[in-house]
Structure formats: structure tokens, C-alpha cells
Amino acid sequence: MSTLSAILITLNVEQHIEACLSALSFTDEIIVVDSGSTDRTAELAKQHTDHVLVTEWKGYAEAKQFALEKATGDWVLWVDADERVPEPLAQEIQDLIENKPAHSGFRVARKAFFLGRWMKHGGWYPGYVVRLFRRESGRFNSARVHESLIIDGSIGTLKEPMLHYTDDSLIHYYDKFNKYTTLAAEDLHERGRGAKITDLLFRPLHMFFKMYVFRLGLLDGIEGFLLAVFSSSYVFVKYAKLWEIQKQKE
């Protein structure tokens, strides 16, 4: 019978960790890599698994790759602390790996909640991401932010969605905003990209109209409007920081 490991990385997520890990009780092994939480995250995690590893922070991709290297299951399920695996998805995963599927990985839809509301539009749903994969067939790329999996082999699609409770407050959103835009700008610079005035003028506008108008974010109420505005601001700040990096290098 195939075995299943769940992996996640944590840092000061005591408000999420118990619900997240409780929903992973169907797995054979849970690997938690904590980057020095100062709240009760690690303490609470240890109530659900014996595999809580505290390490120095080296980046998102590096931390997740480290967690993957500690997993021993035939299959691996990657989750974030603010995500939940509901019972229908858990059952689908268990049935799937027992039947020895031909695919090396599977993508899953996410129902993401922004400020408490499910973002059904604006390009956020289904928002497929690869989260279930054969341990020997997957590895994380080296992106500083929004890292993803590289899968050797074909990828299938799960039917049931995962739940994602992202940004339950504006304070939480902007706590991540500054860090993520810096990392994204550094990634662009490393890839040889530059920032021009047209990037600052038109890319944010394009993002807003794409999310709010063309992808119908306007149907998600005030939350949909705020998300489109914040996302366009994210693009503006990312390219402004890229311009700043260029200027410093020059």
C-alpha cells in the first residue's frame, strides 16, 4: 500500500496550525519545518506530529525542499498553514494513491478566502496548483517567492478543492506585501529584467482591469474591488523596487 507524507513550513502561524494539521490526520506522516516561530506554532504542531524541525530561515523554496527531503512517503502532499484539506478532498487523495495512478503529480483547485469572502472571480478560482506528487518525481524551483514544484512526469487534476484562508485582515496582507514585492523584484533582476516607465504606468492598470473587469472581480463585492486595487499596487511596487535595484547597481 502506498504511503502519504504531508509537508509544510511555518513561522508564527499559531492561529492556523492546529486546524491545518488536524485536517491532515489521514496522512501517514506530517513534516513541519519551522523557521524559529516566537509564538506557540512549534509547540502546537508537536501535539499533532513528532516531526517538527526548527531551522534557520533560508527562503521559501529552500525550506520546502528541506521538508521534502525529510519526507519518507511514496506520495507527498504539500500544504501551507493557512490551507485546509476538507474531508472530500482527503478521501479523493486516499482513493487515488491506493489505485496506483499513472500520473506523477496532481493539481488541485483552491477556494481562496480574502477578508473572509470566497474570491470566486478575479482569476483566483480555481487557481490550480500542483500539491500532490510522487516523492521521487518532484522538487521545488529556486524562486524567492511564489515558488512552485517541478514534476518529472505527467500531471493530473483532482476534482475536490482545497480551502485557502489567506489574508483575513489588511494588516496581515500588508505585512506580506513589502516582503513579497522585494523578493519578486529581486527574482526579476536576477533573470535580467529591467523596469521602464511603461512598466510603472501600464502594468498596474492592466492588472486591475484584468482582475476586476475581464475576470469579473466586480462580482465579488467590495472585497473583489479591494483585491484588484491591491494587486495592481503590488505590481507597481514590484517594478518600482526593480527600478531601485537597477539604479543602485548602476
Image (tube, helix red, strand yellow):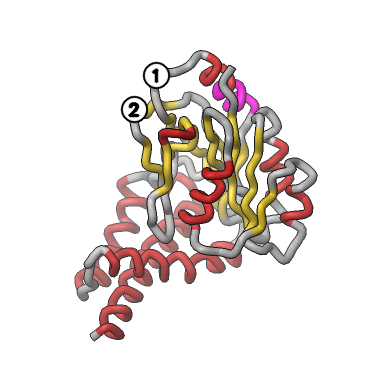
Answer with left or right where residue 96 lies relative to residue 105: right
Which three-letter amino acid code belongs to the residue tagged 2? Ser
Q: Residue at x 43, y 30 (%)?
A: 106
Q: Main secondary structure of the magenta part?
A: helix
Tell me where residue 200 appears, x and y as whole percent: 27, 71
| Magenta stretch bounds | 87-93
Which residue position is annotated with label 1?
102
Q: Earlier in the sequence, mark 1 or mark 2?
A: 1
- Residue 108 placed where, x, y %? 47, 33
- Determine which residue is flagged by label 2: 154
Quarter of the image with the C terminus is bottom left
Local packing at callout 2 (Cα closer than 10 Å; few below 14, some 14-19, many 20+) is few
Name the image quarter holding the N terminus.
top right
Q: Nearer the viewer, residue 72 or 22?
A: 72
Residue 155 visible in image? yes
- Secondary structure found at label 2: loop
Tell me the number on the disc at residue 113: none
Tell whether position 182 is magenta.
no
Q: Position of residue 155 (x, y in %)?
A: 37, 29
Residue 85 placement (x, y as % from top left): 61, 34
Q: Which residue lies at the image location 39% right of the left edge and 19% below the top edge?
A: 102
Front in this rendered view, residue 63 or 11: 63
Q: Name which residue type carries label 1.
A: Ala
Which residue sits at x=41%, y=47%?
148
Q: Nearer the viewer, residue 194 or 26?
A: 26
Q: Are marks 1 and 2 in contact (CB under 8 Å)?
A: yes
